[in-house]
Structure formats: C-alpha cells, structure tokens
Image (cartoon, grey):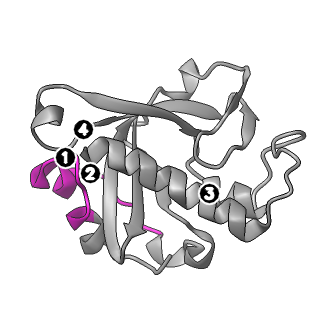
Amino acid sequence: MKPLTEQEIRAAFVNCTKGEAKRLSVPRDLADRPWDDLDFLGWRDPQAYDRAYLVTVLDGSPQALALRCPSPASWQMRRSMCSMCLTAHTGGVSLMVAPKAGAAGRQGNSVGTYICSDLACSLYVRGTKDAGVGARLQESLTLEEKIQRTVANVAAFLAKVTA
C-alpha cells in the first residue's frame, strides 16, 4: 500500500460525515508505518477506544471506514478467528461494526465482522507480528495468496458497508 497523508485519509471515509471525518483522531506516526507491509491501515482511537478506523486502497482510490468496537475490558478470553486474515487469537479478536454508508447508515443500519483487535492483520499474515502459539493455521497457500485473500476479505466487508 502506498503511504497516505492525513488529508487523503480524512477524505476517504465512506460511512461518516465530513465533519466526523475532520474530527476523528488520525495516527500521528503515519510516516513511520510499515506501508510496504500494509494491505490496509487500521488503528484504534486513543481518545475513544470503542472507535477504530480502517483505510484501504481499492482500484487506486483510498476508502475508509469508521468502526465501533468493544473496549479491551470487554474482550472475552476465548480463542477467536479474524475474518480478514484468518489469524486465531485468545482475546485478540473483536466484533467491529461499521455503520452502512448513505441513507441506510443514517437509519441506523450497520454491518459487523470479527477483526484482529489491534487491526494488524497485514503484519500477522506476513509473520512480522506474532499472535502466539497456534495463531496461524497450517496452509498450503503462498504468502502472496494469503495477502490476496486478506485484501479480498477487506474489499468484501467494504462492499457490504457501501451496498
């Protein structure tokens, strides 16, 4: 993924207003992120930990989602699997819910999926971040195929939000 600026990120949100996008907390360390290893940029809001954000580039255009998620205090300590990268964690996967885009979202409709609580799916897939013993299933897929699967899963979730 190519590096994104704060302005590009704020303009990419598809499921919140321009005012909400302007007020949300964008990471200050964008220049230090491992962009070459990211299929999407994800972060938790440091001021409101029940909020998370996900930005990806599809067809050359950045698209971003505002997400609601449980706080760490409510994470259940059972093994769960991320729907994006298929990494299993103990207490490290959260149900994240995105308001739908447009009129459906304004009516309160939303879509949810289970995602790594730290939104570091790209790093788990590449093995640069360790989720612990038994976190990665033994697969015959190549690394490139696993990356493509993760990208496809993110795109499918985004499509549900924007449908």
Magenta-highlighted residues: 10-29
The residue at 9%/37% (across/down) is 103
Q: In the image, what residue type sits under mark 2?
A: Leu
Which kind of residue does numbered mark 3 sit on? Answer: Arg
What is the three-letter code of the residue carrying label 1? Cys
Query: First in sequence: mark 1 or mark 3?
Result: 1
Marks 1 & 2, CB-CB < 8 Å contact: yes
Relative to 142, say whether 162 is above or below. above
User: Which is in the foreground here, disc 4 or disc 3?
Assistant: 3
How many angstroms separate mark 2 from mark 3 (CA)? 29 Å
Figure disc tally: 4
Is disc 3 placed on a helix, strand or loop?
A: helix
**Residue shown at 35% from the left, 32% from the top:** 111
* Mark 3, residue position: 149
Q: Which residue is mark 2?
A: 24
How far apart, in angstroms, are the residues tagged by discs 4 and 3? 23 Å
Q: Given this view, does label 2 or label 4 mark the residue nearer the observer? A: 4
Q: Is residue 144 magenta?
A: no
Name the quarter where the C terminus is drawn: top left
Local SS, label 4:
loop
| Left/right of residue 46 with respect to residue 117 in the rendered view | left
Taking the spot 61% from the left edge, 53% from the top edge, the residue there is 120
Q: Secondary structure at mark 2?
A: loop
Q: Of callouts 2 and 4, which one flags the residue occurring earlier in the amino acid sequence? A: 2
